Image: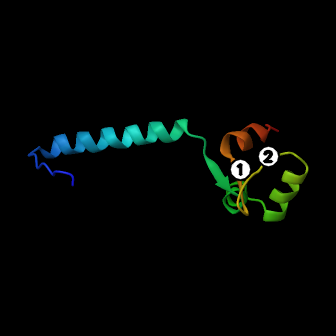
């Protein structure tokens, strides 16, 4: 069983600790690769699901499957996008 310690801190100290925890969490999540579900990717890019499937078949974007769900790496999708 874990022991619980109660410590008195000011509101400012609490805010600082919360901000540090949030910043640490954001930094960690940026380092990890973000996978986007197929439906969310279609919404982000403003295209239909069949368009996403077509791009995947044509090799324009690479897909990853876990069980029967399809995901795309955000970094790879961004690299696939070319300026016009």
Q: Residue at x 21, y 55 (%)?
A: 1
In the drawing, does residue 42 fall left or right of residue 24? Answer: right
Residue placed farthest to the front in the image? 1
Residue placed farthest to the right in the image? 58
Q: Residue at x 15, y 46 (%)?
A: 11
Q: Give percent across and percent down for residue 61.
A: 81, 46
Q: Give percent across and percent down for residue 8.
A: 8, 46
Q: Residue at x 15, y 52 (%)?
A: 4
Q: Give percent across and percent down for residue 68.
A: 73, 63
Residue designated by label 2: 62
In the drawing, does residue 79 fall left or right of residue 30? Answer: right
Q: State how the image is colored.
A: rainbow
Q: Is residue 25 above or below residue 64?
A: above
Total residue callouts: 2
Using the image, tell me which numbered label, if any, was put on residue 72: 1
Instruction: Find residue 46 and report its image quarter.
Output: bottom right
Instruction: Find residue 82 and report its image quarter.
Output: top right
Instruction: Find residue 39 and report its image quarter.
Output: bottom right
In the drawing, does residue 22 fall left or right of residue 29? Answer: left
Q: Secondary structure at mark 2?
A: loop
Q: Secondary structure at mark 1?
A: strand
Q: Residues within 10 Å of mark 1 (few under 14, many from 20)?
A: many
Q: Residues within 10 Å of mark 2 (few under 14, many from 20)?
A: some
Please say if the residues under marks 2 and 1 sit with CB atoms less than 8 Å apart. Answer: yes
The answer to which of 7 and 19 lies nearer the viewer is 7
In the drawing, does residue 65 fall left or right of residue 28? Answer: right
Report the quarter where the C terminus lies. Answer: top right
Q: Give percent across and percent down for residue 58.
A: 91, 49
């Amino acid at each position: 069983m874990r022991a619980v310690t109660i410590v008195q801190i000011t509101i400012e100290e609490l805010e600082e600790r919360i901000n540090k925890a949030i910043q640490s969490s954001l930094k960690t999540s940026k380092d990890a690769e973000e996978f986007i579900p197929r439906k969310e990717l279609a919404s982000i890019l403003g295209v239909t699901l069949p368009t996403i499937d077509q791009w995947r078949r044509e090799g324009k974007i690479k897909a990853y499957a876990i069980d029967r769900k399809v995901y795309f790496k955000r970094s790879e999708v961004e690299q696939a996008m070319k300026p016009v």
